[in-house]
Image (cartoon, helix red, strand yellow):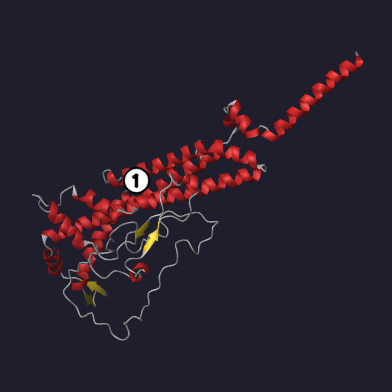
Amino acid sequence: MAFEKDDDDKPKDTTPTDASRPAPFTYQPPAPFGGSKSNNTGPSLFKSSTPNTTGPAFGSSTALDPASSGTIPPTKTSFEAPDALKSVRERLDFSELEDINFPDEKIARPKVFGIKAWLKTVYAESRGFELGTFDASILPVVWKKQSGNWDALGLGYISDIITIVHRYTQDLLRALCKDERVLQAIEGVLLDHLTERYKKSIDHATFILTVERSGTPLTTNHYFTDNLEKSRNARTKAQLEKSAFWDPAQQSNVVKLEAIMTAKSNSSNEDQTIDDLHDILKSYYKVARKRFVDVMCMQAADFHLVTGPDAPTKVFSPTFVGGLSTEQLAAIAGEDLLTKRKRGELTRKIENLEIGKKIALA
């Protein structure tokens, strides 16, 4: 759904002049995801599926207003087709990983329109007997909606890391083992252990997503308070700038006290509540997004797949080889049937020659 940006200002003449009229724009369909990227570079969490953080909030189904008044700054997504989709995967899966990894899913870009109308609808549907505030259950609802693309983005990222690690493991084995039969036997023995570790990474990523999106919106990061204060100050400043005038004595813009009181009283209780809800959501989203990206990268990707004690690259070790059964060792390093047959024939010939030698010397 598309959201219209709310504007508390009075209607203004927005007819563009010749100097401000933008040049005609011709839409060009976006290039295939990852088409211009080198294969030597790994995937980047929330990279191509999200716009710049200076514009609308990324990884969401709605965009947060940069301020409660004014116009939305131009972004790349502002000029793209509204139905433009982005893939959450950059790597093609191996056939043995298709049942583990997250499928390649197309997600819509975040909407560049405001969300005031939607927030008003949610507030009206859940409004109770609160005075000057909103129901505490509203924030988890709007937060889960705002982070609606995180599941696909996060699991798609981890699936790409799994694919890269699996490719690295195969290339490393091929570089060390030149015998194709032994190589295939080793890969067959390792596959179950590798997939077990891949699943742990996916399960941990799912756990992080559950805590972030379905848990209680919670943070002790002081940047939440800082961001919330900045948002409220930006709205107040935008309202007071309408009444500011130049004071030659002060050599600066000033605002009359009466204008300040009028600006404070012009908004209804509902509008003030919606503004507060928007500021809280926007401030919390900034903090939670950075936390989510760091935790997903450090724990689900780095610890479980690269550097942790149970990482897939550490499966094939002396301890692992020492734990293999005699049958498994024979299947990996044993002789093939043709060699065994020839060895048996040579053994029988030696035995016959020994018998003949004894007879000849008797």
The residue shown at (61%, 45%) is: 172
- Relative to 129, does residue 207 appear above or below in the rendering? above
Residue 122 figure quarter = bottom left
- Relative to 125, does residue 351 appear above or below in the rendering? above
- Relative to 103, does residue 115 appear above or below in the rendering? below
Residue 238 figure quarter = bottom left
The residue shown at (86%, 20%) is: 356
Residue 315 visible in the displayed image: no
The residue shown at (88%, 19%) is: 357
What amino acid type is highlighted by mark number 1?
A: Leu
- Relative to 28, does residue 280 appear above or below in the rendering? above
Describe the element under mark 1 as helix, strand or loop: helix
Q: How far across and how far down the image is residue 184, in percent?
A: 60, 41
Q: Is residue 44 left or right of residue 284?
A: right
Residue denoted by label 1? 209
Which of 188 and 158 lies nearest the eye of the viewer? 188
Where's the C terminus, which quadrant? top right
- Which residue sits furthest bottom? 18
Which of 240 and 181 lies nearest the eye of the viewer? 181
Q: Residues within 10 Å of mark 1 (few under 14, many from 20)?
A: some
Q: How far across and how far down the image is residue 114, in percent?
A: 24, 64
